[in-house]
Image (cartoon, rainbow, N blue to C red):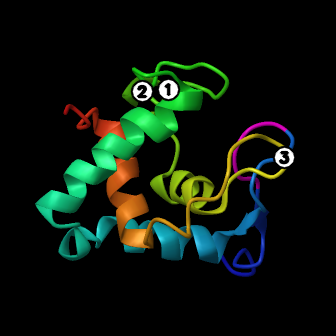
Amino acid sequence: MAGSEGRVLPVGPGPGGPEPLTRAAVVALTLCTFGAVADEPPEERQVELVRMLRHDCGACHGLRLDGGLGPPLTPETLAGVAPAVLEQVVLEGRRGTPMPPWKALLSPGEARWMVRAMQTGGIDE
């Protein structure tokens, strides 16, 4: 679609969501997501990331990630949400909400892995 590269797409529901992304940014992030198998964290780090999901994220999103102060992070509630959008929320947080940015503790590849784990239900300890 000619001329649509600069079109701004909303990201996330409700006020205080992350900054809008351009169509080009969404495409780039999506391509990075699907081509990211090579940067999968080592198994030891994956265990740490699951622990982080269960305990740090679980403090607000519920210990079973089924909701609390923050929304549920279950495969059902995350279905249909672009992984790139979720990765941005994990790394940048949501301004105006208690959701903090985690980019100081997570690499983009680790955020990508966590999102994939949440969307597929692959976070069993």
Q: Earlier in the sequence, mark 3 or mark 2?
A: 3
Q: Position of residue 112 (x, y in %)?
A: 39, 60
Tell me the element at label 1. helix
Magenta stretch, main secondary structure class: loop
- In the rendered structure, the answer to whether residue 17 lies left or right of residue 102 reads right
Tell me the element at label 3. loop
Q: What residue is drawn where x is 48% and y is 40%?
A: 56
Q: Residue 10, relative to residue 32: is it above or below?
A: above
Residue 23 versus residue 123: which sits nearer the camera? 123
Tell me the element at label 2. loop
Q: Quadrant of the C terminus?
A: top left
Check residue 16 in the rendering and tell me which mark sits there, or answer none.
3
User: Residue 122 occupies which quadrant of the picture?
Assistant: top left
Question: Which amino acid lies under the numbered mark 1 shown in the image of this protein?
Answer: Thr
At label 2, counting other C-alpha atoms closer than 10 Å, the crowd grade (few under 14, some 14-19, many 20 or more) is some
Question: Which amino acid lies under the numbered mark 2 shown in the image of this protein?
Answer: Thr
Q: Residue 102, relative to residue 97: is it above or below?
A: below
How many marks do you count on the picture?
A: 3
Magenta segment: 10-14
Q: Which residue is mark 1?
A: 77
Q: Quadrant of the N terminus?
A: bottom right
Q: Which residue is mark 2?
A: 74
Q: What residue is drawn where x is 15% and y is 59%?
A: 44
Q: CA distance from mark 3 to mark 2?
A: 21 Å
Q: Is residue 42 magenta?
A: no
Q: Are marks 3 and 1 in contact (CB under 8 Å)?
A: no
Q: Nearer the viewer, mark 3 or mark 1?
A: 3
Q: Residue 5, relative to residue 80: is it above or below?
A: below
Question: Which amino acid lies under the numbered mark 3 shown in the image of this protein?
Answer: Gly
